[in-house]
Image (spheres, rainbow, N blue to C red):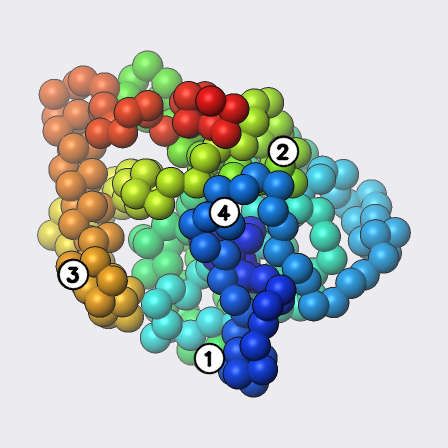
Amino acid sequence: MVHHFDHRFGTYEGQTESQSKQGKCPEFTDADHSDATKQPLPYYWVDERFVSERLEGRWSHPWLLGWRDICRSGDMRTVITAAIPRVAVGDKYLLMLPGEQHVRLAGCLLANLASLVFDFCARQKVGGTNLKYFVMKQLPALVPARYVQPASWDGTRSLRDWVTHRVLELSYSANDLAGFAADCGYDGPPFRWNAERRAIIRAELDAAFFHLYGVDRSDTDYILDTFPVLRDKETRVHGEFRSKRLVLERYDALSEAMATATAYVSPLSPPPGDPRATHAT
C-alpha cells in the first residue's frame, strides 16, 4: 500500500478477485493523489488504542517512518520506504523512528533510505525476499551531523533544508501527513500531486545523494544501469530510461554549481517546496 514518498500507493477499495489472488491492490491514480482528502481503504482494522499502547513511551508523533519488508534484489527497487500516518502496521512494514533530538531530520532520513545509491548498497546485502532489521542496520546511511552543514552546491542553506523542502513536496500530498510536515518545520497545506515535477525532484535527491556518498559520474552511470527492471519499465512507459537521464542531468548541474561556487538552481518553477506548489493556490 506504500511506495517511495507515497503512503497512498495502493488501496483495497475496488480490488478484483484476480488482483486478490495475485496479492495486488488497485493503485491510486494521479487524479486520486490530487485529492488531498482521499485515503486508501485498508483490509484489516485495528483499534486505535492498541496502537497508542504499543507506542506509549516510545513515540509520540502522529506519523511513522518505515520500509517494506518483502523485497528482492531483482525487483525494480529493493528498499521501498515512506512516511505514513500513525496507524497499525504488521511485521511486513518495519519501523525506523528517529530519536527526539533528530525528529526535525526525519525528512532527510527518508530521502536517504529512498535514494538509488542506498538501494544499490542494499542489493549487495539482501539475499532472500526480506529486508529485516539486521540487514538494514548494516547499510550505510549519512550521520545526522552531515545535514547541519551547508549543501555543497548551495552555500546559502543547510543540507537539511535543501533536502527537506524536496521531501515535503514529495511526501506531503494529503492532509493525514500534516503532523509529519509540521515536525519537518512546515505548517502549510499539502502539496499538489504533479507526476512530472515529482520525477525531477526525485532525480535531484538521487543526484544529491550520489554526490554525498562520493560517487563519481562514471560510477553513478554504472550504478543506474544495475536497475534493469526499473529501466525496462520506464522504457515501456516513457520510451527511455527516464530516471537515468534525469539523475545524470541533475548530477551534472550539481557538479557545475560546486565547481563554480554558485548556488544550484532547480529547473522547476516554482522551486521544490515552494508554497505556490501547494493545494492552497
Q: Which of marks 4 and 3 is nearer the N terminus?
A: 4
Q: Quote the CA–CA distance across marks 4 and 2.
A: 15 Å
User: From the image, which quarter does the N terminus lie in?
Assistant: bottom right
Disc number placed over residue 33 in the picture, else none: 4
261 vs 58: above or below: above
Q: What residue type is labelled 4?
A: His
Q: In which quarter of the image is residue 181?
A: top right
Q: Quote the CA–CA distance across marks 4 and 3.
A: 24 Å
Q: Quote the CA–CA distance across marks 2 and 1.
A: 36 Å
Residue behind mark 3: 239
Q: Using a 10 Å C-alpha cutoff, classify the residue at mark 2 as few (fewer than 14 neighbours), some (14 to 19) or many (20 or more).
A: many
Observer-side mark, 4 or 1, equals 4
Image coords of residue 253 (percent x, y): 16, 33
Disc number placed over residue 128 in the picture, else none: 1
Q: Which of marks 1 and 3 is nearer the N terminus?
A: 1
SS at circle 3: loop
Q: Earlier in the sequence, mark 4 or mark 2?
A: 4
Whether residue 236 is visible to the viewer of this picture, yes or no, is yes
Observer-side mark, 4 or 2, equals 4
Observer-side mark, 1 or 3, equals 3
Residue behind mark 2: 178
Observer-side mark, 2 or 1, equals 2
